[in-house]
Every structure is written in C-alpha cells, then in structure tokens.
Image: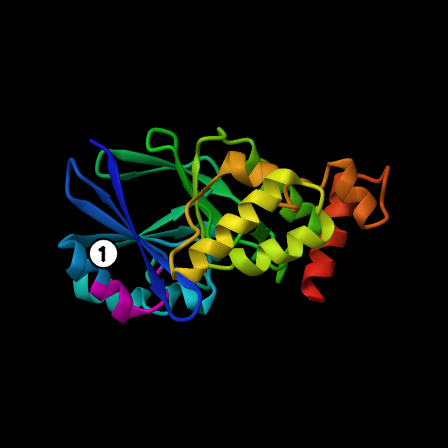
Amino acid sequence: MPLLIHQFAIGSDNLGILIHDQSTGRTASIDAGEEAPILQAVKETGWTLTDLFITHHHGDHIAALQPLKERFGARVVAPAADAHRIPAIDVAVREGDEVQLGETGFTIFETPGHTSGHIAYYSAEAKVVFAGDTLFSMGCGRLFEGTPHEMWTSLSKLARLPDETLLYCGHEYTLSNASFALRYDAGNAALQKRAQAVEALRAKGEFTIPSTIGLEKATNPFLRAAELDLARAVGLAGHPAVEVFAALRDAKNKG
C-alpha cells in the first residue's frame, strides 16, 4: 500500500510533513519545528504520530521534539553525528542505514554542508526523498557548518537519485530561489517555464513543493554548477564545478 504524505505550513516559511504507512498505520513527522501546527495536522488527518524523523539539529526543526515525544511516545530517529545536539534520540543513524516506517523502508544519506550532521531520508519504493535543508526547490541550504566541497558532494549524491523521485524540503523558498536562478541562468527555457509556474502557484497561496529530482537537475543552479553557462555567469569557465557552486552560494548569501 502506498505511503501517504501530508504537507502543511509552519510559521512563515517552514514546511511540516507527515508521512503515513497505510499498511500499519505508523505515522512520522519529518522534523519537529513547532508543536501546534503538527498537532493540528495530526488532528486533520486522523493519523496517530508514532515517529519523528529528524534531519538536523537547528531549532526550527527540533523545537517540538521533546513535547511530541512525551505526548505520543514517538520514536525519535536522528543523525548519529548530532547525538550531542539532538535530545531524546532512540535510533541514531548513519550513511547507508535503513529505517522502517511500518512496511515502508528508508535509506539514510549523510548530507553535510548546511550542518555537519545533516541527513536525508530516501525511500526507493515510495520514490521520495526528504532532504531537509540540504536541497531546496531551485536552491540549497546556506553553509553554516560545512564547506562548499561537502555541500557539493551532498547535492551530487541527491542528484544521482532517479529523476522521478519526489523532493520534499524544509522551507517554501521557491519563489525567491527562482528569482536568483534567473539572474545566472537566464537562457534556460526550463527554468523560465518553471519560474512562471511557481509565481502562479504562490499567487494562489499554494505550495511549490514537492518538486522532482529531474526538475531540479534541469532548473536548480546549484545542481547545474558543472554546466558551462553557469560557470560563465560567475566568471569561472573551465574551473571545477565545486568552485562554480561556491561562487553561486556566495552570491546567494549576498542577496
């Protein structure tokens, strides 16, 4: 039976996600940023929260972890590398580990860059990846703790997933990301088309997530750093892709 996914807003731009294994009824929250919206989502779906799948230690992703664990007795799955910064972990996971949500399996990818211990949850059977703040729709996370090389490696790992893989991320940043992407990849027809679609969705108050890995490879400048047009745009034609990525990330940081 398929995995059901319910996405909802938390605050101004965080995205909450509940995932529900229909065969067993087990339900996980991807991260735990704020208790009230998650409780409302649980009420709306009628699901019972059994698990908390944590991607990284930032407060807007774990602030409600302990209250939710206490309320529901939920199992906390989180990166082993952040065990000293994430409380109440039941299952500490590393690269290549497998986690079950009922009958739905997830493979753990270590994706450092945004933070040193960041992880993503990938289900081949459900064809979905929950990337937290590593890969956004047409963007990527700011490098608070990692290096450009680490983040480029993490993004490249996610880019190798099948094109049809659904991408869910931690924030609704797509509109501003599209504006940035067009500054450096203006001749990209796929990007132009997608930017128009994103603007229409946001004008109606609708989410732009999920995306797909294939769509990101075609339109996300941070995944396209090996392309000559992007290298030329930052004055680094002939340089390694990681240097182009670093230049793009620096430009995004500066607005």
Residue depicted at 75% across the width and 43% down the height: 230
State the image coordinates of residue 246 (x, y, percent, origin top left): 74, 51
List the residue tagged with mark 1. 74
Q: Does the segment drawn in magenta span residue 39?
A: yes
Looking at this view, is 197 or 163 the one in front? 197
Q: Position of 25 compared to 31: left or right?
A: left
Q: Position of 114 compared to 123: left or right?
A: right
Q: Secondary structure at mark 1?
A: loop
Q: Position of 15 compared to 23: left or right?
A: right
- Main SS, magenta region, reads helix
Residue depicted at 17% across the width and 59% down the height: 44
Q: For the C terminus, give its image quadrant.
A: bottom right
State the image coordinates of residue 118 (x, y, percent, origin top left): 51, 52
Amino acid type of the residue tagged 1 in the rendering = Ala
Asked if one can make out residue 83 in the rendered structure from this viewpoint, the answer is no
Q: For the N terminus, give its image quadrant.
A: top left
State the image coordinates of residue 85 (x, y, percent, origin top left): 46, 64
Stretch of the chain drawn in magenta:
32-40
Q: Residues within 10 Å of mark 1 (few under 14, many from 20)?
A: many
Quadrant position of residue 236: top right
93 shown above or below 1: below
Quadrant position of residue 26: top left
Q: Position of 180 compared to 48: left or right?
A: right
Quadrant position of residue 107: top left
